[in-house]
Image (cartoon, rainbow, N blue to C red):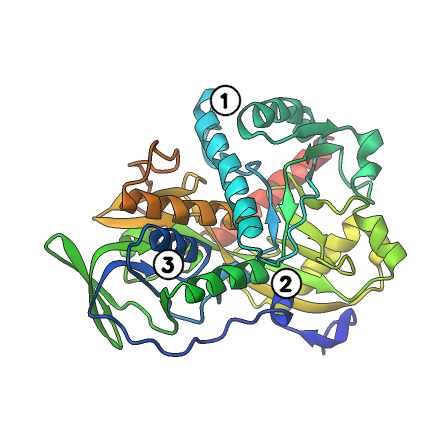
């Protein structure tokens, strides 16, 4: 029997797909030869293809599913402007000086997305309304003053600390111990942003082969042979842009990227007065818990889109909906009794150092590891990878590093995630108890 808070029209699929649902494209004839093959038709792959086309470089985009089937049409639609870059749970935090080039590039990534949307007139609800990060406990709040200083210095974040007595200006809840406002933050409709990129690719004659998985990659001299069920293509360069859906054809990347399920629910349309209490200034909102939650209103302001790490691992999103619903009511008791219309999941690609990566490994170009900042970072890394192939890079991107860590005990099997989840929940409980 479904939970009582499920709406009569409840759907176990992304709310965003009501506006754009990924579908197979008309079959394209695969070329025998192309200058660049891009594996993965998400934000990274399509931005790489668009930049290659601007440089007059022929390319073919291949996707195992429908373009946009993965996280590009499933994410929360929040663009944070660099606040998540460099945030590590399992390693010693970076010094300010070490973090500065990454934060600068993260700020550039935000600007790139904003510029693409404005230049190409992509109708995706881009709203530069700011991003509020709630402090889970007093120690997290106390650390925010330094974070604000660093973000403003290196990431142009327009950040400020919000004390507890001003929290109600940003969020209709007393759940947090104050927080941090990132003025240079935004939200959008992720599926319509993706659709805009896809439409641009098709309008510019870029071949996008949907439901065409790559089943083999063989180096042939200075180039590659890319094998698919529909034939083999010879290419000079290959870009791997598979992120949280990286598979067995590239084991060297599969053991460096950890796919973690993120789960989201969408409420029914709320009374306008009630919706106004949630986020008075229409901010995107997240918190500093290790078991993260993130949320924002829908582009029309009528619903709450609420996501988080309801489970660690791969689980049916219907099973996680009650967990997210409880998290939502913890923060917004005024939503008690409202129903949810959609629940879904998608993979976030974490790396072992919790940093996005681009570069060249085993002679394959790659743009991988969004670490929860996929809209900006994957768009940027795809763009930068294409510029690198075109020889247009006038400085090295900070995320283009020779180091892409792996671990001898990890080959792509995420058996350990439930244990990490238990550890994170315990640490969150202890931190909250402390104040």
Front label number (2 vs 3): 3
**Quarter assignment of residue 408:** top left
> Which residue is identified by label 2?
320
From the image, which quarter does the C terminus lie in?
A: top right
User: CA gap, disc 2 to disc 3?
Assistant: 24 Å
Secondary structure found at label 1:
helix
Instruction: Tell me the residue at 70%/51% (across/down).
Output: 296
Left or right: 18 as drawn, with respect to 420: right
Secondary structure found at label 3:
loop
Q: Earlier in the sequence, mark 1 or mark 3?
A: 1
User: CA gap, disc 2 to disc 1?
Assistant: 37 Å
Q: Residue furthest left?
A: 221
Which of the two residues, 260 or 237, is positioned nearer the viewer here? 237
> Which residue is identified by label 3?
246
Q: Residue furthest right?
A: 273
Please rate how many residues cluster around mark 2, counting C-alpha atoms within 10 Å: few if below 14, some from 14 to 19, many from 20: many
Residue 74 visible here: no
Coordinates of residue 225 in the picture (x, y in percent):
18, 63
**Quarter assignment of residue 153:** top right
Give residue 237's mark: none
Which of the two residues, 308 or 285, is positioned nearer the viewer here? 285
| Marks 1 & 3, CB-CB < 8 Å contact | no
Instruction: Tell me the residue at 27%/44% (across/down).
Output: 360
From the image, which quarter does the N terminus lie in?
A: bottom right
> Which residue is identified by label 1?
96
Q: Earlier in the sequence, mark 2 or mark 1?
A: 1
Coordinates of residue 251 in the picture (x, y in percent):
28, 56
């Amino acid at each position: 029997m479904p939970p009582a808070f499920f709406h009569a029209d409840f759907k176990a699929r992304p709310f965003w797909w009501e506006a754009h649902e990924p579908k197979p494209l008309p079959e394209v004839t695969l070329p025998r030869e192309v200058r660049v093959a891009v594996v993965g038709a998400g934000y990274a792959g399509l931005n790489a293809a668009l930049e290659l086309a601007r440089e007059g470089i022929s390319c073919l985009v291949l996707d195992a599913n429908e373009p946009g089937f993965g996280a590009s049409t499933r994410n929360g639609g929040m663009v944070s402007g660099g606040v998540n870059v460099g945030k590590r749970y399992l390693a010693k935090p970076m010094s300010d000086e070490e973090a500065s080039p990454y934060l600068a590039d993260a700020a550039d990534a935000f600007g790139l997305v904003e510029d693409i949307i404005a230049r190409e007139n992509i109708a995706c609800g881009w709203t530069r309304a700011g991003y509020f990060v709630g402090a889970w406990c007093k120690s997290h709040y106390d650390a925010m003053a330094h974070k604000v200083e660093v973000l403003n210095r290196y990431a142009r974040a327009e950040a400020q600390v919000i004390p507890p007595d001003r929290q109600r200006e940003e969020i209709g809840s007393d759940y947090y111990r104050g927080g941090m406002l990132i003025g240079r933050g935004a939200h959008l409709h992720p599926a319509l942003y993706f659709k805009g990129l896809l439409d641009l690719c098709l309008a510019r004659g870029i071949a996008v082969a949907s439901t065409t998985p790559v089943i083999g990659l063989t180096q042939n001299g200075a180039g590659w042979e890319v094998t698919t069920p529909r034939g083999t293509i010879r290419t000079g360069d290959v870009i791997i842009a598979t992120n949280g859906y990286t598979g067995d054809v590239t084991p060297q990347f599969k053991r460096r990227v950890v796919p973690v399920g993120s789960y989201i629910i969408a409420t029914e349309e709320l009374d306008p007065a009630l919706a106004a209490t949630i986020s008075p200034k229409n901010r995107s909102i997240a918190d500093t818990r290790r078991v993260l939650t993130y949320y924002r209103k829908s582009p029309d302001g009528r619903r709450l889109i609420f996501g988080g790490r309801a489970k660690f691992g791969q689980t049916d999103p219907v099973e996680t909906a009650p967990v997210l619903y409880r998290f939502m009511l913890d923060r917004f008791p005024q939503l008690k009794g409202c129903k949810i219309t959609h629940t879904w999941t998608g993979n976030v690609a974490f790396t072992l150092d919790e940093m996005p990566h681009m570069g060249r490994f085993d002679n394959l170009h790659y743009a991988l590891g969004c670490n929860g900042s996929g809209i900006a970072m994957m768009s940027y890394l795809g763009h930068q990878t294409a510029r690198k192939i075109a020889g247009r890079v006038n400085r090295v991107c900070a995320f283009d590093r020779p180091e892409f860590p792996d671990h001898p005990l990890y080959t792509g099997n995420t058996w350990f995630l439930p244990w990490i989840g238990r550890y994170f929940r315990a640490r969150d409980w202890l931190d909250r108890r402390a104040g």
